[in-house]
């Protein structure tokens, strides 16, 4: 039997092989970019450790801390850290206008949302740093859940 | 149509490549993967999107690019619906921070539109592939018949 050259036809194996090639090619610039930005990215947690604060640490700051509640309005209305200011992305402009007169550069801002898993506190903290150019902004580790646990534990 | 769809994915990929940390936060919002994987995917997925988009535009590794993008959009639609069902208030992340104010309905409409476009392209490619299979079958039959007559 003579050797017969067969034109290849499109097949699932072809699509899979091409997909694997594309995935492998995409890894190269991704790894390069990750290496280039390695010092600017928090690889283990969405919020860098330097920006996190525990309930005990924040409470120890006493009057030197200003508390910011990043949860929705109804949750804030139900209960919140005593003296906290509501500041969420739903009504940012109005709430920020009420918050700002109470801030001073020597105060540490502690932002919290409902729990460790929510992102609202991180988002609000980011806006306070980037847009409002405020310094000493921290996110409360564990959020409102951790605050309640600690406060009930102390009682 | 493949140029338009491919161009859309290249554009979306470029927006996310410019701010991978924010895209990582957007992935993390879905609460499906831990941050360890979300941030690493945030570096990888935009490049994959761009390469697959270019594959569609230049018809190089075309079927692989089409398959990957279709799989990605299906997973993304599933994740969006699941997040909504769990009551999560998420930003899309699909066009970087440009899409952060889209409502859930807008997200879903655009995702389904993209999925339909990809499905059409996939359908055309499958038909084209089946046509080639038919041609190959006839060509092979002719060659074997010729060889048989020569050997005989």
Image: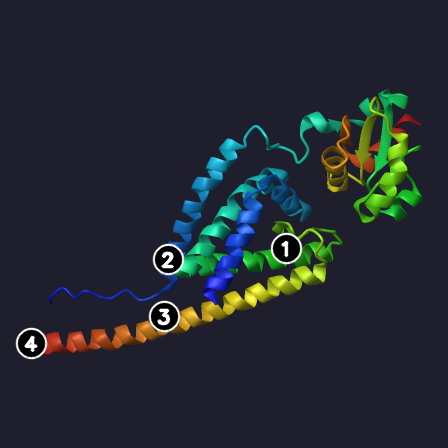
Estimate how packed mark 4 is, as few (under 14), some (14 to 19) or many (20 or more) residues with alpha carbons within 10 Å: few
User: Tag 1, which chain?
Assistant: B
Q: Reading the chain from its start, which is encountered first: label 3 or label 2?
A: 2
Check disc 4 and report the residue beneath it. B150
Residue at point 16% right, 74% down?
Answer: B144
Q: CA distance from mark 2 to mark 1?
A: 29 Å
Asked whether, in this view, residue B121 is left or right of residue B131, the answer is: right
Q: Which mark is residue B79?
A: 1
SS at mark 1?
helix
Residue sitting nearer the eye, A141 or A61: A61
Residue sitting nearer the eye, B63 or B93: B93
Check disc 3 and report the residue beneath it. B129
Mark in the foreground, 4 or 2: 2
Placement of A70 over or under B53, stated as above or below: above
Check disc 2 and report the residue beneath it. B60
Same chain assignment for discs 2 and 1: yes
Mark in the foreground, 4 or 3: 3
Same chain assignment for discs 1 and 3: yes
Same chain assignment for discs 4 and 2: yes
Figure quadrant of residue B141: bottom left
């Amino acid at each position: 039997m003579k050797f017969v050259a067969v034109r290849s036809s499109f097949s699932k194996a072809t699509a899979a092989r091409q997909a694997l090639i594309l995935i492998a090619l995409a890894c190269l610039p991704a790894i390069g970019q990750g290496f280039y930005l390695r010092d600017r990215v928090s690889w283990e947690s969405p919020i860098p450790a330097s920006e996190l604060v525990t309930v005990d640490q924040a409470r120890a700051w006493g009057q030197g801390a200003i508390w910011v509640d990043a949860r929705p309005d109804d949750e804030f209305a139900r209960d919140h850290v005593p003296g906290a200011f509501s500041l969420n992305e739903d009504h940012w402009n109005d709430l920020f206008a009420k918050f700002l007169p109470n801030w001073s550069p020597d105060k540490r801002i502690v932002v919290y949302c409902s729990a460790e898993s929510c992102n609202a506190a991180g988002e609000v903290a980011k806006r306070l740093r980037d847009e409002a150019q405020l310094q000493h902004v921290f996110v409360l580790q564990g959020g409102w859940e951790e605050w309640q646990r600690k406060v009930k534990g102390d009682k | 149509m493949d140029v338009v769809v491919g161009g859309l994915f290249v554009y979306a990929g470029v927006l996310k490549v410019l701010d991978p940390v924010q895209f990582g936060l957007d992935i993390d919002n879905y609460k499906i993967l831990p941050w360890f994987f979300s941030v690493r995917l945030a570096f990888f997925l935009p490049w994959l999107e761009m390469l697959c988009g270019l594959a569609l535009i230049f018809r190089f590794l075309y079927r692989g690019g089409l398959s990957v993008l279709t799989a990605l959009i299906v997973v993304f639609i599933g994740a969006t619906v699941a997040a909504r069902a769990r009551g999560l208030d998420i930003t899309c992340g699909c066009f970087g921070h440009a899409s952060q104010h889209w409502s859930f309905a807008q997200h879903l409409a655009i995702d389904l539109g993209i999925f339909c476009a990809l499905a059409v392209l996939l359908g055309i490619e499958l038909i084209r592939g089946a046509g080639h299979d038919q041609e190959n079958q006839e060509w092979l039959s002719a060659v074997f018949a010729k060889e048989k007559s020569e050997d005989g």
